[in-house]
Amino acid sequence: MKVILFGATGMVGQGVLRECLLDPGVEQILAVGRNPTGQRNPKLRELIQSDLFSLGPVEQQLQGYDACFFCLGVSSMGMTEEAYRRVTCDLTVSVARTLAKLNPGMTFAYISGAGTDSSEQGNSMWARVKGATENALLQLPFKAAYMFRPGFIMPLHGIKSKTLAYRIIYTLSRPFWRQLQAAYPQAITTTEQVGRAMIRAARSGAPKAVLESADINALAKA
C-alpha cells in the first residue's frame, strides 16, 4: 500500500507516520507539507510545498497512491470563523479534490474531532466548520472516505503537540492517563491507535464512515 500523508509534523501526523513506517504492508509514504519531518527512512519521501492550495505543479508526484491520511489542522483558538474555515475546510477540500481526480481508487481518511457538527448549524464555530469539511469530503468520488473523530488523544513514543496550550494540558494530565483511560475507554485514544486504525481502514475498510474514539480503538485492535 502506498500512502500520502498530510500533516506529518503535527502531533497526530507524527503518530500516523510512525505506524506507517512500522507497518510492513505500507511500502511507501509520501509526506506532503510546508516543513520537513526530520526523519530518514527508505520508505519515506517528502514533498515540501509552501502553498498547499496550489498542487498543480506537483500533481504528477501525487499519482499512484492507495490512501491519503489527512492529519493537517490548526486550533481554532483566537481565529475568526473565516480564517479557520479557510485553513480547515477550504484547504482540506481543495487537496482532496485534486487527489480524487488523480487517484479515483484512493481511500481518504480525515482527522476531524469529537463533537463535530454534521448539521453545520450549531453554536460552536469549530464544530460547524469541521462538519462542513466532513460533508464535503463524503461527497467526493473516492473509493472510500472515513472521518476520524477522536476525543482526547494521548501522545505516545515521545510525540508532542506543537500547540503550547495542548502541551501544557498533556503535561499536567500525564500522571493521570492510566486512570483516565480506565475510566473513559470510549472517549480516549492514543496516537498509536489512531495510526493503526487509519491503516486498517485504508487496507480493509471500516464499518462506518464516521468513526468516534471507541470505533477508532476497536479498529486499531482488529
Image (tube, grey):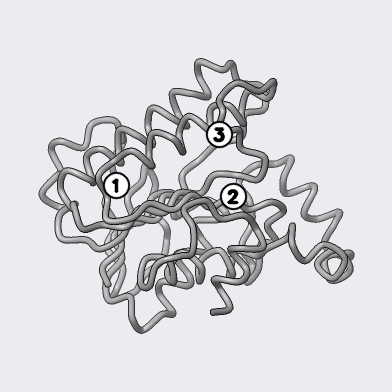
Query: Local crowd at mark 3 within 10 Å, few (<14), some, or many (≥20)?
Result: some
Q: Residue at x 29, y 60 (%)?
A: 30
184 relative to 166 in the view: left or right: right
State the image coordinates of residue 149 (x, y, percent, origin top left). 59, 50
In the rendered view, would you say 222 is above or below 209?
A: below
In the rendered view, would you say 85 is above or below 143?
A: above
Mark-to-mark CA distance, 2 and 1: 27 Å
Task: Report the amino acid beneath label 2.
Answer: Arg
Task: Report the amino acid beneath label 3.
Answer: Ser
Helix, strand or loop at mark 3: loop
55 relative to 127 in the view: left or right: left
20 relative to 170 in the view: left or right: left
State the image coordinates of residue 50 (x, y, percent, origin top left). 31, 36
Depth-wise, is mark 3 or mark 2 nearer the camera? Answer: 3
Mark-to-mark CA distance, 3 and 2: 12 Å
182 relative to 10 in the view: left or right: right
**Who is closer to the viewer here, 127 or 33?**
127
The residue singled out by tag 2 in the image is 149
Depth-wise, is mark 2 or mark 1 nearer the camera? Answer: 2
The residue singled out by tag 1 in the image is 48
Q: Residue at x 47, y 72 (%)?
A: 19
Task: Report the amino acid beneath label 1.
Answer: Ile
**Who is closer to the viewer here, 71 or 156?**
71
State the image coordinates of residue 39 (x, y, percent, origin top left). 41, 66
Query: Local crowd at mark 2 within 10 Å, few (<14), some, or many (≥20)?
Result: many
**Quadrant where the image shows the C terminus:** bottom right
Q: Earlier in the sequence, mark 1 or mark 3?
A: 1
The residue singled out by tag 3 in the image is 118
In the rendered view, would you say 175 is above or below 12?
A: below
Q: Earlier in the sequence, mark 2 or mark 1?
A: 1
Helix, strand or loop at mark 1: strand
